Amino acid sequence: MLQIVPLLLIYFLAPTISTSLDIRLDLKPVDAGSGYTKFKLLQRAAVRSSNRAARLFSGHTGFSGHITAREPVEPHEGEYLIELAIGMPGQAVLLTLDTGSDLIWTQCQPCLICFNQSFPLYNPSVSSTYYKYPCSSKLCNALSLNACHGECMYGYGYGDNSTTFGILSSESFTLGSTDSTVTVQDVGFGCGVLNRGIFLNESGIAGFGRGALSLVSQLGVGKFAYCLTSFDQNNTSPLFMGSLAKLHGPVQTTPILTNPANPTFYYLSLKGITVGTRSLKLPKSVFELKKNGKGGVILDSGTAITRMAQAAFQQVKRAFVSQIKLKVARDTTGIFDLCFLAPPSNSSYNVIVPRLVFHFDGADMEFPQDNYINIDQDTGLLCLLILESDEETIIGNIQQQSMKILYDLEKEKLSFVPAQCDRL
């Protein structure tokens, strides 16, 4: 089940890691300004999370022609968007931040088939720094699968039959916030000219995975960090690279593990869980990354709501049921696995919600209550924001809110600290 072959559709030679680039970016929630209620936002996020999990942990057959590939990530299931500029002069694009993939790509003119996007299509013909890799180039020859039609072509497909074909290209990328920008030359990316599928407002994807073609690998930054504001607010969330990626306060650190079967992902060693006053007695194997590449625990920016391996989820569910003194209720949408009947808004009854702590190797992550419980007065439901999975566990971005999380790529460590993200 846990197989992804291959992740590297476009191969970039990895630069020596350095921290010379200091960059701040602002992330925008994909549903920002939509007008949905908080519960509706959660329902939409839960559906996207379920769909994304199915793609992350299954291989998908690609095209039937000369260009074939498998790709685990649904681009329109991403949760946070980055605005940056490509080319000289710069042209704005809106890309999905994705720590679960490596590829960078955007839609390009002249486009044979393109999905709708909020920005004009990137036009390489008006850029002085655009370059097409020739078929004889080292990068083209390093492609897992390619095609040559006078230039180096790439293509890949997604699990829902979304597809993109394009040209292996190099460009200047301008990144940063309104206060400060940095322009980086010769960033390899896919210039997509034939794209099909269901997308939102984005132009493509910015892969932040651990592979050589990801944005963080190509920029050569040794660290990056983000701090996610509440999903139901319209505030942007800051992302830092280089020396700006640093933490202050009661910092906790845990190793980042590597799964040879899925080297792109950021795996963590989760040892146990506490719900309220109860330390759950979980079998050692429930979060273990197995030799066959299955199982394990991933921290993922593109998944909204945490999905937990079945054996662990059932114990977590029982612990909440025994400690929350409310009647269990059914979510009529069938989206959430555990809900309770919430007391009326005019009731004086005070719901006591047990704390939730994930115990990693060397670090304890205690979640703010809003990260795992939602009370919706319209539906009268109090729901647990964790979904049941099969073997794998994915820690989603809603559970990562109100924490500054740092990925140290050099030391292969993940650190985190509570933070007021809207004040950074």
Image: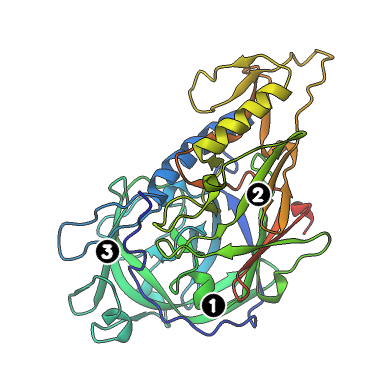
Q: Within 10 Å of the Cα at label 1, are there few (<14), some (14-19), or many (20+) other Cα atoms? A: many
**Disc on res. 155:** 3
Q: Position of residue 123 (x, y in %)?
A: 38, 69
**Disc on res. 400:** 2
Badge 1 marks a residue whose secondary structure is helix
Q: Please determine whether, in this image, residue 87 is positioned above or below residue 303.
A: below
Q: CA distance from mark 3 to mark 2?
A: 33 Å
Three-letter residue code for mark 3: Gly
Three-letter residue code for mark 1: Leu
Q: What residue sits 31% from the left and 86% below the top?
A: 138
Q: CA distance from mark 1 to mark 2?
A: 25 Å
Q: Which residue is mark 1?
A: 219
**Disc on res. 58:** none
- Give the left or right position of residue 395, taking residue 341 as reference: left
Q: CA distance from mark 3 to mark 1?
A: 23 Å
Q: Position of residue 324 (x, y in %)?
A: 72, 22
Query: Which quadrant, please, contains the C terminus?
Result: bottom right
Three-letter residue code for mark 2: Gln
